[in-house]
Image (tube, helix red, strand yellow):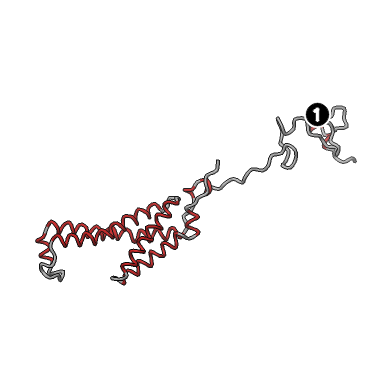
Amino acid sequence: MQPHDPYNNPDHGGQHPSGPYPPQGGAHPSGGYAQPSGYGQSGGYPPPYGQPGGMPPGPPPAGPAATDPASAKMPGTVITVRVFMFLGGIPGLLLGGILLVAGFFFSDHPDVLAATEDSLLIPSGTLTPDDAAMLLLGAGLIPAVYGLISTLLASFLGKRNGFVLWTTVVFQSLAALWLVISLVTSPAAFVPLAFTVLIIGLMVGSKSRAFYKPVPPGP
């Protein structure tokens, strides 16, 4: 019994190279079919890489995080900073808003200020309506401005932009400087100062900086 020869099988379309009608291109020295002329140029499969006419392998497909900056997951360091900035910004807005409203109210109603001086343990006649208004406006302006900027920056921390990163770092650095000065008169400023320094450290960390430097989209 002779072994099965796929080249002499008529069901496979064609005869063995030793037959009267060899395929185009002639027989291969090893006994198989030779590549027909034009193979890899106008039709058929291209030759593998490393052979004449072969194409080098293309770059690996980029993942969704590399092509779409918005699809990258926010690291835990940035999430922590966002929570801290909301916790400091929203109460700052509320406190500053209350003090500002009170300052404008007392400036327009001096009789109310006179009636509340005794309940506030302020000697009668110590503060004029203008003095009380300026004191309240000054006391409310600082937390209101801090709360507004902190809340806005916390809202934009999801934008993968270096401007957001370094604006947050500069803002928190200025806040830390102000709190250091406030330690002279108020030792309680140490608590917000510690949170501010922690925010700065988290934002300049490697994970946060990598999040704000996304890989540019491919062509």
Residue situated in front as seen by the camera: 153 or 130? 130
**Quarter in which the C terminus is drawn:** top right
Disc 1 packing (10 Å; few <14; some 14–19; many ≥20): few
The residue depicted at 39 percent of the width and 51 percent of the height is 156
For numbered disc 1, what is the local secondary structure?
Answer: loop
| As drawn, 108 above or below 192 | above
Residue situated in front as seen by the camera: 13 or 51? 51
Residue situated in front as seen by the camera: 211 or 176? 176
Residue 197 at what x, y percent from top left?
40, 65
State the residue lying farthest toward the right: 1
Residue 139 at what x, y percent from top left?
24, 62
**Quarter in which the N terminus is drawn:** top right
The mark total stands at 1
The residue depicted at 35 percent of the width and 69 percent of the height is 191
- Which residue was labeled with disc 1? 24
The residue depicted at 17 percent of the width and 60 percent of the height is 133
The residue depicted at 13 percent of the width and 56 percent of the height is 108
Residue 167 at what x, y percent from top left?
40, 54
Q: Is residue 147 left or right of residue 82?
A: left
State the residue lying farthest toward the top: 21
The quarter holding residue 19 reads: top right
| As drawn, 120 above or below 47 | below
Could you tell me the amino acid type at mark 1?
Answer: Gln
Q: Is residue 112 left or right of residue 43?
A: left
The quarter holding residue 9 reads: top right
Residue situated in front as seen by the camera: 86 or 167? 167
